[in-house]
Amino acid sequence: MKILNTRRKIMPHPHRVTGLFASRKNGSYIGWESQLEKDLCHLLECNTDIVSYESQSRTFEYIDNGKKRTYTPDFFVVYSDGREMYLEVKFQKFVEKFKQDKQKILEDINKENISFKIITEIDIRCGYFLENIKYLERYADIPVKQSTLDIIAQIKNKYISIERLAEIVPLHEIYNLIYFDYFDVDINNQLIKSNSILGLYND
């Protein structure tokens, strides 16, 4: 088995939607071939443990029943601790067929101890996390003033609502800080609202 640094070009398809995701993290456009892949891009983009990610950028070349074949995972991800992982995006109902069709290469990947994971809609669209992130990312480019951080640092209470905090610092900066995980707030089990409670990490 070889790993080729060869990008598979994403082509228009008559039976599914394809497109490009504007990635701040990568400073480039990331191709996607389904709405599920597009949704995953939102999650990869906001994950502070991920340094970069690419779509269709690494190809496995392998032999199956004497024939040379290739397989290109949907995403290649690099983490801040140096880990690398390949991701395949599939709806849950197609996972078993994918495993059967790609049994040989999946066995080779496992033997080589290559980090590989199949991601489904259960992982991507679980709870309110994705919906919240899609809303909050519009504030990701909003600059946060040092004065805002200083004011937050001086708050004595450990918890404060978004509504209350917005009385003393700009709301759009609060949303930026939530997006970049500055507060302790549950965005998976609840939609972000004005009465959502933010946990402060101030000593």
Image: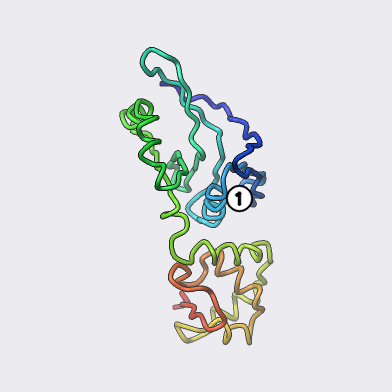
Rendered position, 76 above or below 60: below
Rendered position, 159 above or below 14: below
Please provide percent x and percent y for residue 79: 47, 46
Closest to the observer, 102 or 172:
102
Q: What residue did someone put label 1 on?
A: 25
Where residue 66 sits, quadrant-wise, is top left
Left or right position of 91 against 46: left
Which residue is located at x 66 percent, y 50 percent?
22
Q: Looking at numbered disc 1 in the image, what kind of residue is underneath it?
A: Lys
Closest to the observer, 96 or 188:
96
Closest to the observer, 98 or 1:
98
Please provide percent x and percent y for residue 72: 50, 31
Which residue is located at x 61 percent, y 50 percent?
25
Where residue 153 sits, quadrant-wise, is bottom right
Please provide percent x and percent y for residue 188: 45, 67
Q: Quadrant of the C terminus?
A: bottom left
Which residue is located at x 45 percent, y 44 percent?
90
- Number of residues whose C-alpha sits closer than 10 Å to that of mark 1, classed few (under 14), some (14–19) or many (20 or more): some
